[in-house]
Image (cartoon, grey):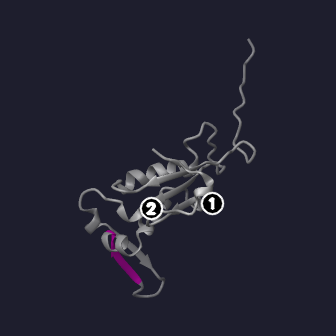
């Protein structure tokens, strides 16, 4: 009996077509929304997903200031930065970071869910976060991400 083999095609630049999606962060839970965005940025929503190739889509997030967190995370969750110098560690609560730089909360959340290598950095560049309801990517005709 002959063995039938069906070759699975690995994604490459000719096969991949990248779509644009827009996400409204108003009243959405940060972690759940970020995991869906990371899923799309990686390309896991496509049939031809290949782990070693960037086959993800572009994602635009609007109304980043209106994102919410469950429980008491707004006051207890802390974001740390370290300059590398003695005494250069800064700690900031999620509430104050959201007030100061609302885009940073979503960007850091999504970035943490992407691979930690040059492929992950390439995927991260396809994320665009905006504080208000307006974005300059109208020409790309973004679809709404459910």
| Range of magenta residues | 89-94
Please tell me which residue is depicted at 41% across the width and 61% down the height of the picture: 63
Please provide percent x and percent y for residue 118: 63, 61
Find out whether residue 26 is within the magenta segment.
Answer: no
> With respect to residue 127, does 89 lie above or below?
below
Tag nearer the camera, 2 or 1: 2
Quadrant (top left/top right/bottom left/bottom right) for the C terminus: top left
Is 66 placed left or right of 44 in the picture?
left
Is 118 placed left or right of 22 in the picture?
right
| Image quarter of residue 48 | top right
Provide the secondary structure element on which disc 2 rests.
loop
Quadrant (top left/top right/bottom left/bottom right) for the N terminus: top right
Please provide percent x and percent y for residue 141: 59, 51
Please provide percent x and percent y for residue 10: 70, 40
| Residue bearing the label numbered 2 | 133
Residue 122 got which mark? 1
* Relative depth, front residue between 100 and 47: 100
Q: For the residue carrying disc 1, how many other residues have a C-alpha within 10 Å: few (<14), some (14-19), or many (20+)?
A: some
> With respect to residue 57, does 128 lie above or below?
below
* Relative depth, front residue between 140 and 71: 140
Please tell me which residue is depicted at 38% across the width and 80% down the height of the picture: 90
Q: Which residue lies furthest to the bottom in this view?
A: 86
> With respect to residue 37, does 94 lie above or below?
below
Please provide percent x and percent y for residue 79: 37, 71
Dominant secondary structure, magenta: strand
- How many numbered markers are drawn? 2
Q: For the residue carrying disc 2, how many other residues have a C-alpha within 10 Å: few (<14), some (14-19), or many (20+)?
A: few
């Amino acid at each position: 009996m002959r063995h039938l083999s069906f070759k699975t095609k690995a994604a490459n630049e000719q096969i991949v077509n990248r779509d644009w999606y827009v996400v409204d962060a108003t009243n959405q839970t940060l972690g759940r929304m970020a995991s869906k965005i990371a899923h799309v940025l990686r390309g896991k929503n496509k049939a031809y997903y290949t782990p070693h190739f960037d086959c993800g889509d572009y994602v635009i997030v609007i109304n980043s200031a209106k994102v919410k967190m469950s429980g008491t995370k707004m006051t207890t969750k802390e974001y740390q930065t370290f300059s590398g110098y003695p005494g250069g560690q800064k700690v900031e609560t999620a509430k104050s970071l959201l007030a100061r730089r609302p885009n940073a909360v979503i960007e850091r959340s999504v970035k943490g869910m992407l691979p930690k290598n040059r492929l992950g950095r390439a995927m991260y560049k396809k994320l665009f976060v905006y504080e208000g309801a307006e974005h300059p990517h109208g020409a790309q005709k973004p679809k709404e991400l459910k």
